[in-house]
Image: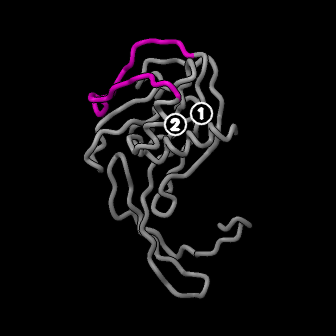
Amino acid sequence: MSDTGEQVIEQVSTEVVYETRYVRLREDRIRRPDGSPGIYSYIEKPDFALVVPLEDDGFHLVEQYRYPVRRRSWEFPQGTLPGMATADPELLAREELRQETGLSAGTMRHLGRLHCAIGMASQGFDVFLATDLVHGQAELEIEEQDLRHQWFPREKVEEMIRTGVITDDSTLAAYTLLLLGV
């Protein structure tokens, strides 16, 4: 659909060409606005929640090894449910925050909804600001066994962004929403 609600590319057929419990690759035969045929391949993944945990004018970040880019990455806590399941975005955000950091939020405010890799994936995400934090014990999943959690002052987070330490697009987009005060 275009921003006016008009569908500009027609889906003629669709086929799942690859699927695991984490991701689905879909190949659609399409018809473009000029009538020419084509194929559009894209990834389907469930939407995720991302949490910006704010405390004492600083942020809680998590660091973990990200296999696709072969490096460790500092990010805001984020994630999906297993098995391509979906859930209420705020409940998912609260669960991801608790599991990855042990933190529980007294206040959770929705900052916005975004899409990552919009040209190649259907996945979107909801961004939440978590405040009034209560500290507890993290409950990491097996895939997160290398995950570290650390609080950083705001100035350090901004330095990490400027110097390319933080490169996760979802974290950067979420921080932008926070700065804009949405």
Please identify the quarter of the rendering in which residue 166 is found. Answer: top left
Identify the amino acid type marked 2: Leu
User: Is label 1 in contact with label 2 (beta carbons under 8 Å)?
Assistant: yes
Between 143 and 65, the residue placed more toward the observer is: 65
Q: Residue at x 60, y 30 (%)?
A: 129
Query: What label does residue 50 carry, if any?
Result: 2
In this picture, is 135 found above or below 168? Answer: above
Residue identified by numbered label 1:
128
What residue is at 39 percent from the left and 37 percent from the top? 82
Q: What colouring method underlies this structural image?
A: one colour
Mark 1 is on which residue type? Phe
- Distance from label 1 to label 2 (Cα)? 6 Å
Q: Quadrant of the C terminus?
A: top right
Which span is picked out in magenta?
Answer: 133-154
Mark 1 secondary-structure assignment: strand
The quarter in which the N terminus is drawn is bottom right
Of the two numbered discs 1 and 2 on the same chain, state the one appearing first in sequence: 2
State the image coordinates of residue 89 (x, y, percent, origin top left).
57, 36
- Residue 171: image x %, image y %? 49, 41
Q: Residues within 10 Å of mark 2 (few under 14, many from 20)?
A: many
Residue 28 appears left or right of 110: left
Is residue 125 located in the magenta-colored stretch of the structure?
Answer: no
Q: Secondary structure at mark 2?
A: strand
Does the magenta segment cover residue 142?
yes
Is residue 3 depicted above or below 66 in this figure? below
Residue appearing at x 46%, y 30% in the figure:
156
User: Where in the figure is residue 3, as x and y percent of width and height?
Assistant: 70, 65
